Image: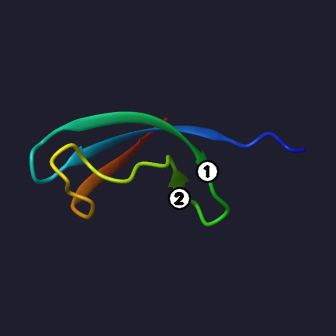
Amino acid sequence: MPKSRRAKVTIRCNVCGETFTLRGRKDPSGGVDTGFKQCLCDNDKHFSIQEEP
């Protein structure tokens, strides 16, 4: 089984400003799957997502 590449991601809620730093797996399309669903303020759509090296 090949090793999956892990990536560090910072997610910032555009509604309340809360930030989350998570690790996720890179998928074949170039995105990162962290399993993040929604913010503490119940926002589930409006986020700024930055991948860190």
Q: Quadrant of the N terminus?
A: top right
The label on residue 40 is: none
Point out which mark residue 31 bears: 2
- Residue extending farthest to the left is 16
Residue 20 locus on image (x, y percent): 31, 36
Left or right: where 23 falls relative to 46: right
Relative horizontal placement of residue 25, taking residue 34 as reference (left or right): right
Number of labels in the image equals 2
> Image check: 14 left or right of 30?
left
**Location of mark 1 (residue):** 26
**Quarter of the image holding residue 2?**
top right
Q: Quadrant of residue 11?
A: top left
The answer to which quarter of the image holds residue 17 is top left
Q: Residue at x 80, y 39 (%)?
A: 3
Q: Residues within 10 Å of mark 1 (few under 14, many from 20)?
A: some
Q: Nearer the viewer, residue 32 or 44?
A: 44
Q: Are marks 2 and 1 in contact (CB under 8 Å)?
A: yes
Residue 13, given in percent of the width and then of the height, sits at 19, 48
Residue placed at 15% from the left, 48% from the top? Answer: 41
Q: Secondary structure at mark 1?
A: strand
Amino acid type, callout 1? Lys
Q: Nearer the viewer, residue 13 or 7?
A: 13
- Image coordinates for residue 48, horizontal then vertical, percent: 26, 53
Task: Give percent across and percent down for residue 50.
Answer: 35, 46
How far is disc 2 from disc 1 in space, using C-alphas? 6 Å
Vertical comparison of 2 with 20: above or below: below
Does residue 27 sit above or below 21 in this rendering?
A: below
Amino acid carrying mark 2 in the image: Gly
> 10 Å neighbourhood of mark 2: few (<14), some, or many (≥20)?
few
Residue placed at 49% from the left, 49% from the top? 35
